[in-house]
Image (cartoon, rainbow, N blue to C red):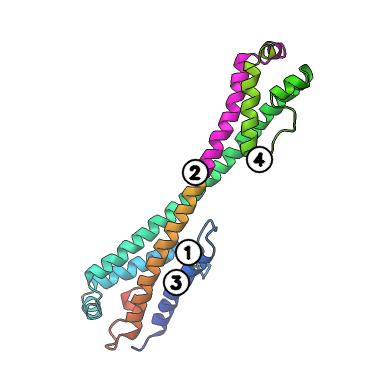
């Protein structure tokens, strides 16, 4: 089949879409997918693919010619289903990564509050108790940096402050009554919940990325096969600009 300049341009756009998918597979951690041609967004690529499928299904002459190559209505419906799946997957990835950013910000805020609560009580305790009591409160060493270790130390500090005889009464004289100890301990719990939420968001974002890559690859293979048919039509009927500006 002899291709016109418009045909060659459209073919290049399709092939650019395939390269874009390959580039995305090499950059899984990217927040957004960028087309090979920066002037052509993935949304525009989706729009053109959708238009091409619609034109091919609705043009009687093209439909008949394509059927001889095995591209009946069912096959185009399969292509549209892959396209819809890819759209949903891209949107889901964007949403999941947005949720991860929010969870990370919330974790940072919760961590700051928890560490400030720990340090404030630790300072009061160090001013009012001896080494033996401080050891019982878990304050014989510096505040842990790692999340898990800090949470363990934080729970130990606030729980023991309320359990060890005589400690709570003395802390109350410094402003740390039972109610305040409970409120400040909740900041440790909030940090633990935020850490769990961020880990869950990480998993969801990775799953969304994997799903997106799988969806784009499936669409890629469908488009690649369709391109082969368009380029090899011996009857010179399947001109790309007729099928659609992909």
| Residue that appears at 63% across and 23% down | 158
| Residue that appears at 33% across and 85% down | 232
Mark 4 vs mark 3, foreground winner is: 4
Judging by the rendered image, the residue that carries numbered circle 2 is 200
The prevailing secondary structure element of the residues shown in magenta is helix
Residue density around tag 1, few if under 14, some if 14–19, many if 20 or more, within 10 Å: some
The kind of secondary structure element at disc 2 is helix
Q: Which residues are magenta?
A: 170-199
Q: Quadrant of residue 173?
A: top right
Q: Would you say 135 lies left or right of 227 here?
A: right
Q: Earlier in the sequence, mark 2 or mark 1?
A: 1
Judging by the rendered image, the residue that carries numbered circle 4 is 146
Q: Would you say 110 lies left or right of 122 here?
A: left
Image quadrant for the C terminus?
bottom left
Disc 2 from disc 4: Cα separation = 19 Å
Location of residue 198 in the rendering, given as x and y in whole percent from the top left corner = 54, 42
| Residue that appears at 42% across and 57% down | 211
């Amino acid at each position: 089949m002899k291709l016109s300049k418009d045909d060659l341009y459209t073919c290049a756009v399709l092939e650019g879409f395939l390269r874009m998918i390959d580039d995305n597979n090499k950059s899984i951690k990217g927040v957004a997918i960028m087309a090979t041609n920066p002037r052509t967004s993935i949304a525009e690529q989706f729009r053109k693919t959708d238009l091409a499928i619609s034109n091919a299904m609705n043009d009687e002459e093209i439909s008949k010619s394509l059927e001889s190559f095995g591209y009946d209505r069912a096959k185009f419906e399969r292509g549209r289903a892959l396209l819809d799946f890819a759209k949903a997957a891209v949107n889901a990835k964007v949403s999941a990564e947005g949720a991860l950013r929010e969870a990370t910000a919330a974790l940072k805020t919760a961590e700051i509050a928890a560490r400030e609560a720990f340090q404030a009580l630790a300072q009061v305790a160090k001013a009012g108790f001896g080494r033996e009591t401080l050891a019982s409160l878990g304050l014989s060493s510096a505040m842990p940096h790692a999340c898990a270790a800090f949470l363990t130390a934080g729970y130990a500090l606030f729980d023991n402050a309320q359990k060890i005889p005589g400690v709570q009464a003395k802390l109350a004289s410094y402003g740390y009554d039972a109610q305040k100890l409970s409120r400040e301990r909740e900041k440790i719990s909030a940090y633990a919940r935020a850490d769990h939420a961020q880990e869950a968001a990480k998993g969801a974002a990775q799953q969304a990325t994997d799903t997106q890559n799988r969806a784009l690859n499936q669409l890629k293979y469908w488009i690649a096969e369709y391109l082969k048919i368009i380029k090899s039509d011996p009857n010179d009927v399947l001109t790309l600009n007729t099928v659609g500006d992909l």
